[in-house]
Image: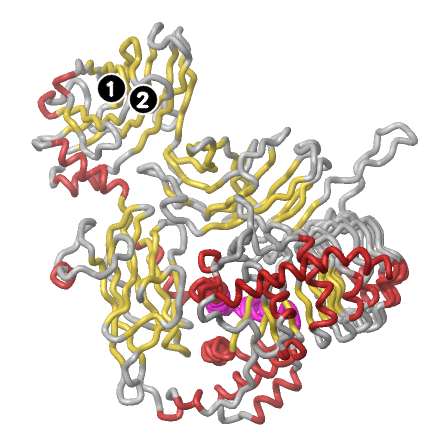
Amino acid sequence: MAAVEEGLEPQLAAAEDAAEDAADTVDAWPAAPPLLAGNRLSLDLYPGGCQRLLHLCAQQTPQLLEVEFLQLSGHEDPQLLEATLARVPWSLPHLRSLVLKGGQQRDALGACLRGSLTTLPARLSGLARLAHLDLSFNSLETLPACVPQMCALGALLLSHNHLSELPEALGALPSLSFLSVTHNRLQALPTALGALSTLQCLDLSENLLDSVPPEIGGLSSLAELSLASNRLQSLPASLAGLRSLRLLVLHSNLLASVPAGLARLPLLTRLDLRDNQLRDVPPELLDAPFVRLQGNPLGKALPDSRSPPGTPMVPEMPRLFLTSDLDSFPVTPQGCSVTLACGVRLQFPAGATTTSVTVRYRQWQPEPRLVPLGPHDTLLSGVLELQPHGVAFRQEVGLWLLFVPPRSRRCREVVVRTLSDDSWSDLETHLEEEAPKRLWAHCQVPHFSWFLVVSRPVSNACLVPPEGTLLFSSGHPGVKVTFPPGATEEPRHVCMQVVRMAGRELQALLQEPEAAVSPLLCLSQSGPSSFLQPVTVQLPLPPGITGLSLDRSRLHLLYRAPPAATWDDITAQVALELTHLYARFQVTHFSWYWLWYTTKTCVGHLAGKAWRRLRLHHVNLIALQRRRDPEQILLQCLPRSKVDATLRRLLERYRGPEPSDTVEMFEGERFFAAFERGIDVDADRPDCVEGRVCFVFYSHLKNVKEVYVTTTLDRQAQAVRGQVSFYRGAVPGEVPEEVPAARHRKGVDALWMATLPIKLPKLPRSEGLGHRANLSLAPLNLGDADTGFLTQSNLLSVAGRLGPDWPTVALHLGVSYQELQRIRHEFRDDLDGQIRHMLFSWAERQAGQPGAVGLLMQALEQSDRRDVAEEVRTVLELGRHKYLDGIRRTSLDPGGLALTGTSASKSPERV
């Protein structure tokens, strides 16, 4: 101990100097807000948190003696952080919770950076009351020696470090009930772990464990155990002795067998064995409703082994199944097969990487900047981002993306589109059908970027050599392009797409029964824009027209050069050679070509209208109110063919006006919904600007959003009759004044599209705003630093949305049926009272427990109330941003500090 104290002398001296400098600096800050809030001291998001704490210690602030919760950032200077922590036992003797997390800063790719913390000062063992210690997202390689000496410790969080082992001394903690060591490098567990008789939750997922010691059966109080995403090949039979176990997660391992005794655990409600190597399981587990076995080769025979005797067996490729709370996974040179929570599958062959790589993924909502579409393309999926970008694999990685089956497949194909070298390209794609309406787009990718699935006109391509070649359309055999010898000096890639227009649409547009057009031809190439020799293009004559009977004065060859949207008549500029069925002409550069047969003049203008109609979708807009909660509004934009089926499904839970009149929209077109006449959106949303909700139309996606609305009018006096209007384009600063007059005209150029009525019914006196004023609920902050916090007001909002669904939500939250019946009886004449009592009594029991907010969102989704779950998720995200904005507004940003060498932490996002 003396040696330790001697080693700290220079550090403490440096800390004292830093404290004096900090005191001078802090005293100079204008109107600095108080750092202490009750018994909490949160300095993890403050620049120079250690210096602030040293300043408070130097001032001998009396309130420090009352502090029970302390948060510091792991991104502080290591020496300053260690010296600061050495003073904590003296200055904060009543400390009960110490959070020293990293992860508040991110790298250029958006990944959380680990803190610099590698050890803790020995003097922290003197914190006799410390019950909660969080060292997540740091650089610990060994557990600090002072931790096993913290006798009052009840919760220990060590996730996202570099720990390769845990000490045997850890088993001496008499009060430990929660231990999380996820995302480390553990290869073995100490046998003393089984001595933690008070341990209730143990999470060891995402490590390198290949075995579990039998002593783990001594954890008599253990209720939750997660060993997911390790390398376990077997389990000890002692697991069957964990009589308190409720949740056992073992997915994504190499298990070939499991103990039969697991089926006899009296309290077990979930056993997750997905994605292992199980070919046979005990019958009592096979039929148990709480067991998950997907992704196992059940019933399959072992592959024949032709290896010589004595050759070691090579284990099958590891398989991982990620849950929704994980956005990254490790890939080793051994390879692995991964299924993401969003349904995407990845297969990394052995040798794809030479070192371990952490892969991160994110699902983006489609929007024009992320969805590059050609004029005749349609989007069939969301946007998947895989990181790290640009890292080349030694072997190509298999990627399977789920997509919505296209309504029309004639002369069209499905491809995966990706960003590569700052340009978008289409990958060779194979389709796999798992079920009639469950299709996969499979491709091989050499590196990671953004990926999406699109439907496009069939594309035929070839490499044109100097000797010349022939290219023809697979969907329209009469469309051909002949390249003569000498057309190019260097080989170049050429691509052809053909689009057909229905004759009825053209005749309706032109009001001419004899009008006809050929297929629309699009030619593109790489390299120089022109060919050295004329290239011969062959197009079929318009339907019903032959070379022997046509009137050449009515035949027009039209040409369009992107990005211009105009079509030019070039009939007089080329020599048209006509046969009985085809027209041939020569060109030196590529673009769009179209043959028209009509008596009309100004054919180029008419072709522009026809081409625009080819790309338009006929849609209807709907606005429905939930029957049991009229403040919940569902907004959706649907293709006309889907409206009836969608309404039949929705009208069981919603009611509202008839859909709007048919509107024409382009694929990927922006529009927005604006609530008017006294109605406004009830909560901040990232897709909402001053009560206007943003949309992007994609014909094969749902284009649906649910929002909650409110009003400033007195609903106790009368019902509120408002409306929602739909406008084209991105949300403007204000709706232009000419819009009301523009509602009398329609078309793709009109800003206004539709207006639908919204009615908020009159409230009885007992249901007015006064019922919230009479609440006497204890203030609380439900949640933790990882997921964010929900306040009393947030929970009241959730309670107001549940309605008759509350018993289902309660059961998914773990509320017993007996308690449910008691609440119903106690508040038998007050539905709102039932909901609020259930929700707040559950929240009070969860106070201080990690993962409570995630449990609430999971219960809402399992109860088919994803609308409320999305609202909770939005509240958490907005709360996090508002908290950081508040810090900056109160002069706590780096620009308002006189300290040098500090920088503001980036906004921590959920990992």
Does dot 2 land on a helix, a strand or a loop? loop
**Which residue sits at x=48%, y=69%?**
32
Is 521 displayed left or right of 230 in the figure?
left
Labels 1 & 2 near each other (Cβ < 8 A): yes
Quarter of the image with the N terminus in it: bottom right
Q: Position of residue 441 (x, y in %)?
A: 52, 40
Is 11 displayed left or right of 63 in the figure?
right
Mark 2 surroundings within 10 Å by alpha-carbon count, few (fewer than 14), some (14 through 19), many (20 or more) = some
**Which residue sits at x=47%, y=37%?**
416
Q: Vertical placement of 676 versus 362: above or below?
A: below
Query: Is residue 862 inside the magenta stretch?
Result: yes
Name the image colouring.
Answer: secondary structure
Q: Vertical placement of 784 versus 595: above or below?
A: below
**Which residue sits at x=52%, y=76%?**
791
Residue 582 got which mark? 1
The residue pinned by badge 2 equals 478
| Residue bounds of the magenta highlight | 848-877
Q: Position of residue 605 (x, y in %)?
A: 13, 35
